[in-house]
Amino acid sequence: MILAMVLLFSTLSAAAQNVKNDSIQEKFFNAKVRELVYRLHITDEQKAKFVPVYRRYNDEMRAAWGVRAKKGNAKTDKEKNKQRTSADVAAAKKKQIERQQKVQNVQMKYLDEFAKVLNAQQLNRFFDVEKKIQSKAMQRKIHKRGKMGIRPNKEHKHPQGQKRPHGKGHKNGSFEEN
């Protein structure tokens, strides 16, 4: 009976986690769409055609990038890096290049589809704007990890060696282009 309860609880918690992740991903997707519509000045008519194409593109891009393994603590990562051979580094670099090729293939595949929906100026700016949105989201994720007490992979320090305080100089609101 207890085993059945544990299995039921673990199944329900796993399902809840998947729903939570799907919900977060959907919210992020909707935020990206809003930002793209705003930055590219996409009309309502264009938006109706753009969103389904962008959803497929977004899903394929996520698959092309793949899920990266979580890193351990910095000390053990440094020790592992010291033990890596040239062959290990070459294999990792090959995987990185293969992933980049997959991403470029997805971009090439959807370029013509976006050209059917967006005008020349919008299409010309699309990939740059999307890249800035992704970059800003990654910066926020790293910043949020720092606020939660989770040490980011790289610590940001002032030239004097002091840690940069979180929140200072950080703009709130929507994703912004520089």
Image (cartoon, rainbow, N blue to C red):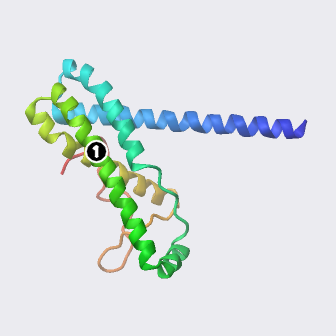
Q: How many marks?
A: 1
- Residue 107 lies in quadrant: top left
Question: Residue 115: horizontal and vertical position, in percent?
Answer: 16, 30
Q: Is residue 175 visible?
A: no
Q: Does 21 appear above or below 145?
A: above
* Picture residue at 18% right of the left edge, 51% below the top: 178
Question: Residue 45: horizontal and vertical position, in percent?
Answer: 20, 17
Quick check: 147 left or right of 157? right
- Residue 127 lies in quadrant: top left
Q: Pick whichever, 20 or 91, lies toward us.
A: 91
Q: Residue furthest left?
A: 120
* Picture residue at 20% right of the left edge, 22% below the top: 46
Inspect the image, locate mark 1, and give the three-letter code of the amino acid beneath it. Asn
* Picture residue at 41% right of the left edge, 73% below the top: 89
Question: Residue 86: horizontal and vertical position, in percent?
Answer: 41, 78
Q: Does 93 appear above or below 135?
A: below
Q: Residues within 10 Å of mark 1 (few under 14, many from 20)?
A: some
Quick check: 74 left or right of 27? right
- Residue 20 lies in quadrant: top right
Residue on which disc 1 sits:
105
Q: Does 44 appear above or below 57?
A: above
Question: Residue 151: horizontal and vertical position, in percent?
Answer: 49, 65
Quick check: 61 left or right of 132? right
